[in-house]
Image (cartoon, rainbow, N blue to C red):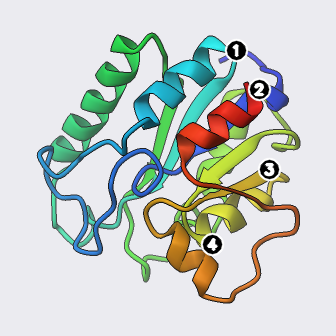
Amino acid sequence: MNQIDPYKLIILDRDGVINQDSDAYVKTLDEWIPIPGSIKAIADLYKAGYTICIATNQSGLAREYFTLETLNEMHTELINLVEKAGGKIHSIEFCPHGPDDNCDCRKPLPGMFRKIADKFELDDLTGAYTVGDSLRDLEAGKQLNCTTILVKTGKGQRTISSGKSLPHGTLIHDDLHSFAASII
């Protein structure tokens, strides 16, 4: 892929930001339910000139809660809904590993973010946004200098209530739609 303006790059977490999250994992296409306003927000960001990528931990694969085929069905549905709304997702990166697999891609490690940076020939992600609902989402992006955005959907409210420090400069929004509206 060609180099892009990192100030026009947004890296989204999936579960809890784009679609409803579940402590029991999102295991089927039927369980993959978009959060109201999230699909339109992605389309609006794309129309405003942003490059949209997704970085998502999917340890349900390692735990055998669902198959790669099922994950691909969920991502195909996401891509199709965004395209129907006039948007585009440029890249979906996922970590298939469990917490004890010693990979470099499972957030809060920055492997998926490095992969996105490499795809767009960027040394780091200074200026890019990362939007998540958990501390690990923000920590992964911060390692490559992303501007961190916490949404209150998914586990966001729990993250705020945990009392743990958010990365310096983190902005908080009600949901993906309100974040998109704030930068468009």
State if disc 2 and disc 1 touch (CB < 8 Å): yes
Mark 2 or mark 4: whose residue is earlier in sequence: 2
Regarding residue 118, the answer to whether it shows in the image is: no
Mark 4 residue crowding within 10 angstroms, few (<14) / some (14–19) / many (20+): many
Q: Residue at x 76, y 82 (%)?
A: 165
Residue assigned mark 3:
146
Query: Left or right: where does residue 81 sit relative to residue 87?
Result: left
Q: Specify the label residue 139 is tagged with.
A: none
- Quadrant, the C terminus: top right
At label 1, which amino acid type do we have? Gly
Residue assigned mark 2:
8
State if disc 3 and disc 4 touch (CB < 8 Å): no
Mark 3 or mark 2: whose residue is earlier in sequence: 2
Q: Quadrant of residue 1?
A: top right
Percent from the top left, x then y, of residue 15? 39, 55
Query: Left or right: where does residue 47 sit relative to residue 167?
Result: left
**Foreground residue among 36 and 54:** 36
